[in-house]
Amino acid sequence: MAFELLLLAFAALGQAVQPSAPHPIPAPLRELPWGQLQFLHTTDTHGWLGGHLQEPSFSSDWGDYVSFAKHMRDRADADGTDLLLVDTGDRIEGNGLYDGSKPKGKYIFDIFKGQDIDLLCSGNHELYKVNSSDNEFYETVPNFRGKYLASNLDIYNPKNGKLEPLAQRFKKFTTKNQKIRILSFGFLFDFTGNANNTVVHTVASTIKEDWFKEAIRDRDVDLILVFGHVAIRSPEYDLLFKTIRSEQWDTPIAFLGGHTHIRDYKKYDSKSAAMESGRYMETIGFMSVSGLSTSQESVVDAQNAAKGITFGRRYIDNNLFSLYNHSSTNSSTFPTELGLNVSSMISSARKELKLDHTLGCAPHDFYVNRAPFPAPDSIFSWLQQRVLPDYISASTRVANESKKAIVITNTGGIRFDIFKGPFTRDTEFLVSPFTSGLRYIADVKYESAKRVLELLNNNGPVLEEVARQHGLASWALAPPEQVSDRPEVIAEKDSFSDNLRIPHASDQIPLHPNRNKDNPALIPGYTTHDDLGTDGDDTVHSEISFYRVPNCIQADIGFSEQQETPQTVDLVYNAFIEPWVILALKFLGEGYGKGDTGDYMRESLTEVISAWVGENWGCGEEG
Ligand SMILES: *[C@@H]1O[C@H](CO)[C@@H](O)[C@H](O)[C@H]1NC(C)=O
Ligand SMILES: *[C@@H]1O[C@H](CO)[C@@H](O)[C@H](O)[C@H]1NC(C)=O
Ligand SMILES: *[C@@H]1O[C@H](CO)[C@@H](O)[C@H](O)[C@H]1NC(C)=O
Ligand SMILES: *[C@@H]1O[C@H](CO)[C@@H](O)[C@H](O)[C@H]1NC(C)=O
Ligand SMILES: *[C@@H]1O[C@H](CO)[C@@H](O)[C@H](O)[C@H]1NC(C)=O
Ligand SMILES: *[C@@H]1O[C@H](CO)[C@@H](O)[C@H](O)[C@H]1NC(C)=O
């Protein structure tokens, strides 16, 4: 009896991080620039609440974040400052913990709600499917009642069919310790790809609504906080900044953003700044603001206000080495009971979903953006030269009917690198989370079919026309990390064929435990350049190169060098890019429509990849 109790107590004690998480590697750290008010910011977590189990730099899980936040709140309470937690959406899709269950998301909402988040909003991923936005309505909004904001988002209430705001439009509140009066809004960018049970109002129309105009006229405000699933360098945030500034010439404004998966910080004016905090639970964003007036009148406030507004920022690598350091704890003082409970909820969900089940073992790393295309370690070269040819050449059309095929797939459909070692059921969801299958148009003139790729890869009329007709932005084709409105990147957008090193976007690269040869003291990783300089990352890293890849890649199947050029080929593509393919063909004088398309094979690209891994990548010693 006593022994059982002891065992129970021991089990309940649990452990931080997931059981198979790698140990973080010690590295030089920069301190958090603690201020009067601080934000901890997560965005675009895409279900990675278990952390990264093959990357030591990001190996902490959501439970560890729960423990960390508790220590940070305690610190704020101890020194009379304030701390707010914000999440800016895209919490779902992209990790087995979400995608692997039936129905999807069965486990994630309870795990997520273990964190005491002060403010949150929806991303675009929450809205692609009726089921997922209904999940926001039934789960996340009630779990965070009064904290979830929806400044420009409505939903058809699934209970009565009435169109209503998904959550309250804005919120005004006073912070716990400093009594700072904050007016906050929670936005989504001008997204158009949502299912028809939600309505996204553009930012331009929202700022004309009476509730908004009235809200920003409030003078009894010390800080305006605009958080959202919006890139911090975007027309939407520019417009919000200008609109608020036109009404409040002097009030400090803090922006927190997301969507483009990068670490970034932007200065709007001397009293306004914005932060974006990466992706996939790699980064916990830390932003501080000091010099704010408060509702409490005191000598200290007057002194603060006289000093002017200062902002600070840090991109925290989400691993225990960093989290212990910033919270002045160690392995015994760090974990809280609730944090351990959340970690163990994650590990039991992972176990039930069999996410550690191994399909094969990768012989080396394959990269999305850390290798140029083509290259031996490019994930796209691997798809183009191995996976697609092996699979498509066994299709009925090719194998039995001697048809040739051109297969086009967008690079944005592949979301993550493959690391040397076990390729698990989890890896499958990380690499290729989308479930769409391969479709085709039969017997397209070869001369036309072979030109489709170039039309999808240059920023020409086809992309513009699809954007106009279908509201589908071309950013959806390539990896989201490549989207940026930074001028230097726009200047390079016309040359997708070159593998350009992007000067300022070297910031979104997954780490890997190899030591850099030139500077053995540093681990390669994020080396962010932002409006405050190059000291934003909490961990001092050596730099990793980042390469722009084309929107789409192409594999030719069934061609052999001896044969003359064919008259016709099957044009095969992943279902997601169908509108672009049809318009490209139209542009080339080929009048195909939706009715001319069909399913090429039943399997999705994800299933194709997994089957290939199972057949080709053994885990024996030879691997
Ligand atoms: C959508 O939600 C319903 C109700 O929870 C569920 O039965 C169904 O399986 C879900 N569909 C998908 C594709 O997950
Ligand atoms: C959304 O589309 C479905 C299927 O096309 C239709 O049945 C439904 O009425 C639409 N809902 C709304 C709110 O327009
Ligand atoms: C955190 O790391 C910094 C620099 O690496 C070090 O100077 C400091 O003492 C550490 N703090 C704690 C509490 O471990
Ligand atoms: C952690 O810190 C506490 C208090 O500072 C100390 O008593 C304990 O020995 C430390 N534990 C470890 C594992 O370093
Ligand atoms: C953690 O889980 C245990 C066992 O389920 C439960 O008794 C306890 O109340 C939980 N603690 C917290 C802080 O949620
Ligand atoms: C294609 O060929 C394979 C073997 O040659 C055969 O098993 C299969 O039934 C054929 N499929 C069709 C649709 O003709």
Image (spheres, rainbow, N blue to C red):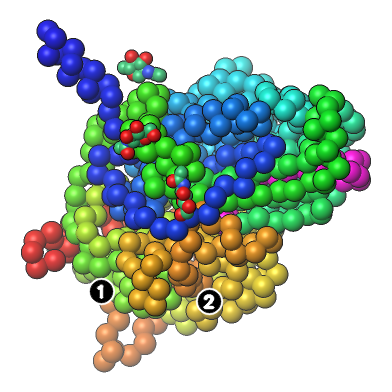
Quadrant in which the C terminus appears: bottom left
Select label 2 or label 1 by which is in front.
Answer: 2
Residue 257 highlighted magenta (yes or no):
yes
User: What range of the chain is rendered magenta?
Assistant: 243-263
Tell me the SS state at disc 1. loop
Residue displayed at 81% across by 42% down: 252
Above or below, comparing residue 433 to residue 209 in the picture: below
Q: Nearer the viewer, residue 168 or 383?
A: 168
Neighbours of disc 1 within 10 Å: few (<14), some (14-19), many (20+): few
579 left or right of 470 in image:
left
Residue displayed at 19% across by 49% down: 358
Q: Amino acid at mark 2?
A: Arg
| Total tally of numbered discs in the picture | 2
Residue 489 highlighted magenta (yes or no):
no
Task: Return the residue at label 2.
Answer: 501
594 left or right of 104 in image:
right
The percent position of residue 482, horizontal first and vertical second, equals: 55, 64
The percent position of residue 564, horizontal first and vertical second, equals: 33, 90
Residue displayed at 24% across by 18% down: 9
Q: Is residue 8 visible?
A: yes
613 left or right of 493 in image:
left
Q: Residue furthest top?
A: 1
Distance from Cα at disc 2 to Cα at disc 1:
41 Å
Quadrant in which the N terminus appears: top left
Q: Which image quadrant for residue 48?
A: top left
Q: Nearer the viewer, residue 11 or 217?
A: 11
Neighbours of disc 2 within 10 Å: few (<14), some (14-19), many (20+): some
Q: Nearer the viewer, residue 110 or 24?
A: 24
Q: Amino acid at mark 1?
A: Ser
| Disc ID at residue 402 | 1
Residue displayed at 59% across by 73% down: 503
The percent position of residue 486, horizontal first and vertical second, equals: 68, 66
